[in-house]
Image: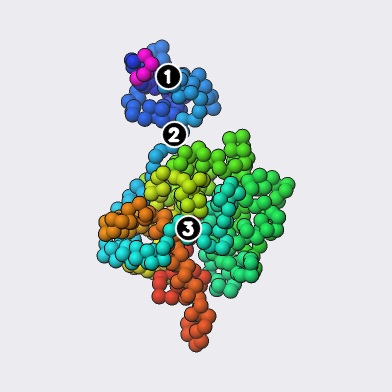
């Protein structure tokens, strides 16, 4: 049984208020088209009694009437909001967290340290392209590479030693972690596999699962984590991109975003289920959107803010809530863990995706980096426009990897001391939290 509702709206063409009858299943559609109108009431007139309808009936005439009355023409009513909602979610999580807190003193001290080190290293978007594995061309092929890379940019941690964990041998070096993914993609392209082309993932005949598994083959006995999930994500994205809407070209999404980073993040989350990094915290849906945001940030950094990387609102992005940046923030004294959470992290106990402790770590990390950004701008007015959450995240991640490398090197040369740390752990710091997830 479907209930119809009425709503009033003002038409600029006739300069008067009109009333239209709307089926209840179009309530969301009508609030999208009439965002300022929240006054819906069931029809009580006998000539507008409840009417039995099939749930799959589209009622195209009503939809056309609604859009025509506003001069919107054909198209989707799913207007993308101007904000991703991630920062608002992070603030809510932080305000309601039980096991994670932010230290004001630690944040103030860390902000100054981070800013001074970034200045000393001349840290900027150009740092992204300086790495030998990142693509250097500034064209659509690089957009495809970045899109593919961030479809698969999740869960590289391992409990094995650096010598035993999943790794890729490429260009005379052994790559682990995030860089193992980048190396695997570059190696595949060198070997003639069009791994960054959506039609390749879409075509099960040309790229069976066995071939995709071969592309991500490891130099060690440990395979890449969540291989089946990665293949499934490639298939899903390939099917979506190879539809008539996108014609196999990720750049279509960038064009639709109209130079808005927030709009592109929302478009990714709306279009691809695997980018929908949301969960429920204390009865409220919260958005974290790690991979969708870092995809946009990588475009911005790779293209240095121009061409496919031109976004007028890049400052709207937050840090990318993973397991590395929280480790750094805790080590810097910015994040404080409760004894029970610290015990679980120290014992390398798995935190389930979506459980309160895991959500608090991620949400508080996002809010903490926002506070770091504000503190830097407050102390250093010259930083305004030069610093944002993206650059702070990139800097903290690179610093964490440098510290990890030094820690492993010291362990390798140490004799008679403690055993080398598990992959991703750094001597003198709490280990990163353990969560297996496709979202980070």
**Is 410 left or right of 43, judged from the image as shown?**
right
Residue that carries the numbered disc 2 in the rendered image: 79
Name the foreground residue: 330 vs 260.
Answer: 260
Q: Residue 67: x percent and y percent?
A: 45, 23
Comes first in the chain, label 3 or label 2: 2
Residue that carries the numbered disc 1 in the rendered image: 69
Residue that carries the numbered disc 3 in the rendered image: 126
Given this view, does label 3 or label 2 mark the residue nearer the observer?
A: 3
Between the C-alphas of marks 3 and 2, the distance is 34 Å
**Is 396 left or right of 237, judged from the image as shown?**
left
Q: Which residue is drawn at 55% across and 72% down?
A: 162
* Disc 3 crowd, CA 10 A, few/some/many (<14, 14-19, 20+): few
Q: Quadrant of residue 347?
A: bottom left
Looking at the rendered structure, the secondary structure element under dot 1 is: helix
Q: Residue 110: x percent and y percent?
A: 32, 65
Q: In which quarter of the image is residue 244?
A: top right
Magenta segment boundaries in residue numbering:
10-14
Comes first in the chain, label 1 or label 3: 1
């Amino acid at each position: 049984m479907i209930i119809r509702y009425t709503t009033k709206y003002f038409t600029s063409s006739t300069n008067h208020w009109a009333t239209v009858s709307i089926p209840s299943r179009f309530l969301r559609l009508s609030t999208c088209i009439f965002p300022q109108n929240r006054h819906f009431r069931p029809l009580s007139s006998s000539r507008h009694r409840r009417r039995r309808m099939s749930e799959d009936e589209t009622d195209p005439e009503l939809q056309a009437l609604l859009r025509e009355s506003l001069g919107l023409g054909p198209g989707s009513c799913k207007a993308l909001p101007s904000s991703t909602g991630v920062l608002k979610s992070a603030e809510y999580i932080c305000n309601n967290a039980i096991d994670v807190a932010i230290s004001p003193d630690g944040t103030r001290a860390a902000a100054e340290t981070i800013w001074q080190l970034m200045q000393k290293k001349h840290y900027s978007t150009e740092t992204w392209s300086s790495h030998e594995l990142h693509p250097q061309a500034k064209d659509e092929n690089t957009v495809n590479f970045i899109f593919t890379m961030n479809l698969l940019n999740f869960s590289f941690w391992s409990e094995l030693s650096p010598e035993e964990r999943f790794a890729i041998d490429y260009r005379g070096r052994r790559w682990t972690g995030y860089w193992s993914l980048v190396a695997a993609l570059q190696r595949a392209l060198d070997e003639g596999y069009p791994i960054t082309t959506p039609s390749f993932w879409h075509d099960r005949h040309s790229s069976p699962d066995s071939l995709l598994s071969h592309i991500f083959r490891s130099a060690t006995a440990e395979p890449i984590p969540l291989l089946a999930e990665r293949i499934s994500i490639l298939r899903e994205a390939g099917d979506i991109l190879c539809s008539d809407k996108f014609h196999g070209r990720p750049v279509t999404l960038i064009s639709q975003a109209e130079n808005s980073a927030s709009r592109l993040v929302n478009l990714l989350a709306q279009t691809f289920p695997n980018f929908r990094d949301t969960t429920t915290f204390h009865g409220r849906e919260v958005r974290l959107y790690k991979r969708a945001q870092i995809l946009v940030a990588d475009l911005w950094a790779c293209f240095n803010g121009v061409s496919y990387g031109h976004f007028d609102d890049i400052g709207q992005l937050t840090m990318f809530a993973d397991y590395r940046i929280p480790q750094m923030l805790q080590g810097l004294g910015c994040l404080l863990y409760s004894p029970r959470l610290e015990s679980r992290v120290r014992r390398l106990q798995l935190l389930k995706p979506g459980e309160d402790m895991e959500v608090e770590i991620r949400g508080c990390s996002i809010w903490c980096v926002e506070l770091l950004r504000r503190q830097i701008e407050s102390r250093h007015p010259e930083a305004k426009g030069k610093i944002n959450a993206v650059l702070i995240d990139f800097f903290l991640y690179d610093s964490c990897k440098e510290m990890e490398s030094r820690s492993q090197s010291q362990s390798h040369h140490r004799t008679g001391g403690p055993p080398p740390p598990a992959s991703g752990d750094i001597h003198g710091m709490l280990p990163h939290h353990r969560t297996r997830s496709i979202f980070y």
